Image: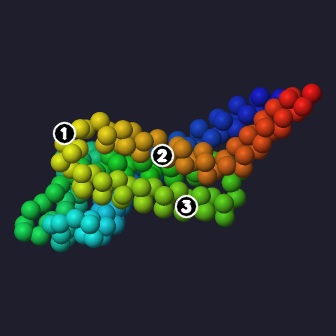
Amino acid sequence: MKRRSRIREGARFLVRFFVIAVPCLLVWWRFLLPHYLWLVGQFAAKILNEIKTPLIESLSVDINSDSILNTETLLVFHLEGGAEFAINYAPMVNSLPPFIVLVLATGGLGLFRRVAILLVGSVIMFLGQGIFLVGQYYFFDQIESKSEIPTAFGQFWLTAPFILWVLLAYWDRIGSILGDDDREEGGATDS
């Protein structure tokens, strides 16, 4: 009986996930992505202006109207002296919506806990994405010759929503599972 309820709950989660994911991702890609990318760029520019020259005087988000759902949106830093630094950073910030969808689709979370998980996870994602952008800009010359490092970090950011979701939404269950294992192992060694 317990197995059937787990299968049913898993099926409900999948249905909720897809019902929430489709409109959430469409709204993200169509409307929110450029604004969020601009915010991440502003955060990174503030840090970069403290540690590196030339100064970033402004930034813009250039949307390629030929791309599907703004997937080729460029973040452009306008540097003093008229130079520009453009990066297609949209794929990096696309890791936020899956986290939001996973949390919204998770059953058994109260409203307060769900909101807290969304806030904490979103702040962690935002800060991480901004710091990663700082690193990409700051070490651009080195990255050009060794693309493995940013690729590895990029892969991490693809998995980050799932890691954060598991840690934030299921921390209490993980702790109890690990705690139960420790007691069982401790009991077995005492005999």
Amino acid beneath label 3: Val
Q: Secondary structure at mark 3?
A: helix
Q: Position of residue 31 (x, y in %)?
A: 34, 59
Within 10 angstroms of label 1, few (less than 14), some, or many (20 or more) residues? few
**Residue at 12% across, 60% down:** 84
- Residue at 36%, 58% (x, y): give it: 131
Q: Is label 2 in a helix, a strand or a loop?
A: helix
Q: Earlier in the sequence, mark 3 or mark 1?
A: 3
Residue drawn at (72%, 46%), measured in percent from left and top?
175
Task: Name the residue carrying label 3.
Answer: 120
Q: Which amino acid lies under the numbered mark 2 shown in the image of this protein? A: Ala
> Mark 1: which amino acid?
Ser
Q: Secondary structure at mark 1?
A: helix
Asked whether residue 18 appears in the rendered view, the answer is: yes
Label 1: which residue? 145
Residue 155 to residue 100: above or below = above
Q: Nearer the viewer, residue 63 or 42?
A: 42
Q: Is residue 67 left or right of residue 160?
A: left
Against 138, residue 53 (above or below) is below
